[in-house]
């Protein structure tokens, strides 16, 4: 199995083996191309979703649409858009990375999250632990990740949105179990002391763990964990920790680019289609938790463990505060990792 970090264009085989009504549409050119700049573990989801949307859009408008994909660490992807990558839509790992598109150049409006349902998060996820077959190290929860005999694989929170969710999930576990931020900081420092390599994105960490056979446990997006289990079967087990974070990946058109390129109508329709029954079903198929469709929620409920989930707002005061406290220069991550 191989994974690609470059652009993906249809057709492409997957690297792992209430609907919204659209407004009346004007006439369109014969074809149009969109670029979806996303984070690592959405590759398989968007391969199928793009095919479904292209078929829908062709039937509705007569226009052919081709969707290119770009994937990498979420923070790195946001920076690429800010630096000029011509994205029509951004489907990043966390609202904080999308906010950066507003604060660094006004690529999107400040209230971008109000433009689509569920705070512009059409699907949700969480963070789980992946261990090797039979769980030889007996890992059951976050506190096992600081044992001296355990090597942990997780990406770099400076570049990866998934890594930030991982970091904050571990921090909140320790804060609740051991009492206070000081104890949480000590715990997370020990955890990162057990990390032999920091990849730039979640998919890179999956490759390090699954293909390069490094580490005893992978901290992973839930959907990435189950795709890995599906691909490799009995080689890996998924462990649901006692507490984790509700991950809410957010989506937005990139206003400056779509207005320049004349692609706003199709880009907006593309994101709206994520909220339709077909879009929600595809999200569930690739192990994301559907956010708005009761039908899709019911269909895929059995594949998701019932977890004790907290939110970024409740535990950390939102992404702005979390980023300043933990991921900005000289914040908690820099403090603990430079001491490694």
Image (cartoon, rainbow, N blue to C red):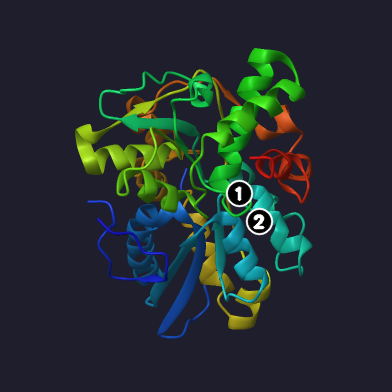
| Quarter occupied by the C terminus | top right
- Bin the neighbour count of mark 1 within 10 Å (Cα to Cα): few under 14, some 14-19, many 20 and up: many
For marks 2 and 1, give the CA distance. Answer: 11 Å
The answer to which of marks 2 and 1 sits earlier in the sequence is 2
Q: Position of residue 246 (x, y in %)?
A: 57, 32
Residue of label 2: 98
Give SS at disc 2: helix
Q: Is residue 117 visible?
A: yes
In the image, taking residue 285 as reference, residue 164 lies left or right, namely: right
In the rendered structure, find residue 80 and report the number of the disc placed on it: none
Q: Residue at x 68, y 20 (%)?
A: 175
Q: Position of residue 159 (x, y in %)?
A: 60, 55
Q: Is residue 47 left or right of residue 290?
A: left
Task: Select label 2 or label 1 by which is in front.
Answer: 2
Name the mark on residue 120: 1
Residue 207 horizontal/vertical position (percent): 36, 50
- Classify the position of the N terminus by image quarter: bottom left
Residue drawn at x 69%, y 45% is 338
Query: Who's the residue at 60% across and 46% down the image?
Result: 117
């Amino acid at each position: 199995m191989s994974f690609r970090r470059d652009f993906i264009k249809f057709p492409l085989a997957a690297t792992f083996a209430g609907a919204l009504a659209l407004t009346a549409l004007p006439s369109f050119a014969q074809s149009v191309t969109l670029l979806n700049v996303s984070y690592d573990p959405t590759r398989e989801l968007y391969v199928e979703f793009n095919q479904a949307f292209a078929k829908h859009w062709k039937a509705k408008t007569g226009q052919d649409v081709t969707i290119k994909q770009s994937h990498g660490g979420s923070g790195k992807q946001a920076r690429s858009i800010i630096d000029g990558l011509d994205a029509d839509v951004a489907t990043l790992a966390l609202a904080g990375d999308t906010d950066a598109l507003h604060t660094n150049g006004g690529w999107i409006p400040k209230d971008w999250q109000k433009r689509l349902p569920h705070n512009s998060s059409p699907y949700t996820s969480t963070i789980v632990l992946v261990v090797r077959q039979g769980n030889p190290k007996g890992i059951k929860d976050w506190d096992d990740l600081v044992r001296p005999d355990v090597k942990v694989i997780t990406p770099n929170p400076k570049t990866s949105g998934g890594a930030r969710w991982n970091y904050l999930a571990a921090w909140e576990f320790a804060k609740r179990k051991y009492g206070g931020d000081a104890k949480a900081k000590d715990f997370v420092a020990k955890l990162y002391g057990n990390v032999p390599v920091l990849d730039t994105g979640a998919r890179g960490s999956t490759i390090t763990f699954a293909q390069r056979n490094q580490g005893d446990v992978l901290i992973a997006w839930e959907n990435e964990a189950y795709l890995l289990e599906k691909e490799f079967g009995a080689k890996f087990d998924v462990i649901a920790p006692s507490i984790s974070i509700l991950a809410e990946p957010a989506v937005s058109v990139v206003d400056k680019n779509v207005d320049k390129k004349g692609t706003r109508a199709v880009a907006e329709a593309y994101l709206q289609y994520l909220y339709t029954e077909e879009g929600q079903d595809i999200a569930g198929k690739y192990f994301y938790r559907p956010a708005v469709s009761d039908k899709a929620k019911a269909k895929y409920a059995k594949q998701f463990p019932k977890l004790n989930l907290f939110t970024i707002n409740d535990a950390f005061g939102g992404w702005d505060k979390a980023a300043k406290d933990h991921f900005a220069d000289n914040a908690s991550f820099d403090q603990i990792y430079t001491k490694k």
